[in-house]
């Protein structure tokens, strides 16, 4: 009886602590959501007593927001598709190919993710200016793909290494080519890992600000750049920025909510060996 009561107490305590931690973690998002419905003059200092208003959403929903939203959606989706097409075959070749320096190539990909963005901004800017890629969606897609490919190779390689090589040998005996076994056998086994990694690339690209604000002006600017306009010489327009930020995070939040099971399954797929 005492053991049962002790187990319940520990379980309830763990549940309460989990909820408290979740509320603390989600507090910035909840505060942003509430602030978006406040009048601008009641944001600072914060006030808990206010009449909700939609004036901030009326102010931020405009043709500019639609243009920046289209740019973000197009650039992010194009980046994810191109990253998958390049990174997945590359990771497969590094694991199952006959490259003599596969480990060296793999670690070269990994080291590129450690390079600070500010260290390469000048040569990239000059290259984009020379090739006419400044303020173009193609330029950002190529740039983000270059950043997404190493991340996806890093993650997907782990999933490939968990696939027993005997499966490929059995497919070879049955007369399957490497091309056929790749699409019909290997990819279905690691599709969860590919999906979860693609979602990480999606979120990273969607939220990227540094290159977007330096490589675009008006035609191809993304939503994070759009949020920057609420910083003016008069200060921050916190209420309008909160309303716009709420609209910006809706897509990643909804996508993450409906795919959380697949995301967790994919991220933990390569966590246990054997």
Image (cartoon, grey):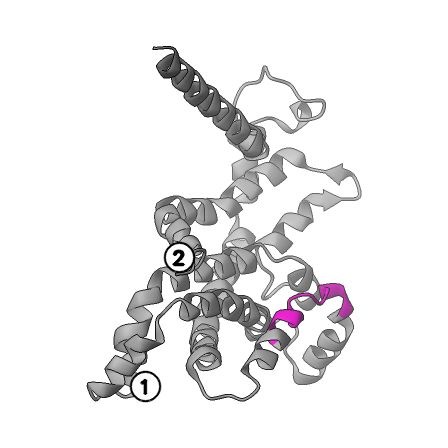
> In this figure, which residue is indicated by the disc labeled 2?
269
Per the image, label 1 sits on a secondary structure element best described as helix
The tag earlier along the polypeptide, 1 or 2, is 1
The residue that appears at 41% across and 49% down in the rendered structure is: 264
The residue that appears at 58% across and 54% down in the rendered structure is: 207
The residue that appears at 57% across and 68% down in the rendered structure is: 144
| Residue 252 visible at all | yes
* Vertical arrangement, residue 65 with respect to residue 40, above or below: below
Instruction: Determine which of the numbered discs, if any, sits on residue 178 in the image.
Output: 1
Residue toward you, 168 or 200: 168
Most frequent secondary structure within the magenta stretch: helix
Where residue 46 appears, as percent x and y from the top left, is 67, 22
Q: Which residues are magenta?
A: 109-119
* Vertical arrangement, residue 75 with respect to residue 37, above or below: below
The extreme left residue here reads 174
In three-dimensional space, the C-alpha distance between marks 1 and 2, rounded to whole angstroms, equals 23 Å
């Amino acid at each position: 009886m005492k053991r049962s009561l002790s187990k319940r107490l520990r379980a309830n305590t763990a549940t309460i602590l989990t909820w408290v931690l979740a509320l603390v973690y989600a507090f910035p998002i909840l505060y942003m959501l509430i602030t978006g419905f406040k009048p601008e003059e009641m944001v600072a200092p914060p006030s808990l007593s206010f009449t909700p208003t939609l004036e901030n959403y009326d102010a931020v929903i405009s043709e500019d927001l639609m243009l920046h939203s289209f740019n973000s959606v197009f650039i992010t989706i194009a980046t994810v598709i191109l990253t998958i097409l390049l990174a997945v075959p590359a990771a497969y070749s590094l694991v199952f190919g006959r490259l003599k320096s596969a480990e060296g190539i793999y670690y070269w990909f990994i080291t590129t993710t450690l390079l600070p963005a500010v260290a390469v901004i000048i040569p990239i800017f000059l290259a984009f200016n020379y090739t006419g890629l400044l303020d173009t969606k193609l330029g950002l897609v190529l740039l983000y793909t270059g950043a997404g490919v190493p991340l996806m190779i890093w993650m997907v390689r782990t999933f490939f290494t968990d696939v027993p090589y005997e499966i490929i040998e059995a497919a070879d005996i049955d007369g399957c080519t490497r091309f056929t076994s790749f699409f019909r056998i290997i990819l279905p086994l690691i599709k969860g890992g590919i999906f979860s990694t693609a979602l990480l690339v999606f979120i990273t690209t969607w939220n990227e600000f540094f290159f977007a604000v330096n490589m675009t002006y008006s035609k191809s600017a993304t939503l994070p750049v759009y949020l920057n306009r609420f910083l003016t010489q008069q200060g921050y327009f916190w209420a309008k920025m909160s309303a716009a930020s709420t609209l910006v995070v809706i897509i990643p939040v909804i996508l993450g909510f409906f795919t959380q099971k697949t995301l967790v399954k994919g991220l933990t797929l390569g966590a246990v060996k054997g």
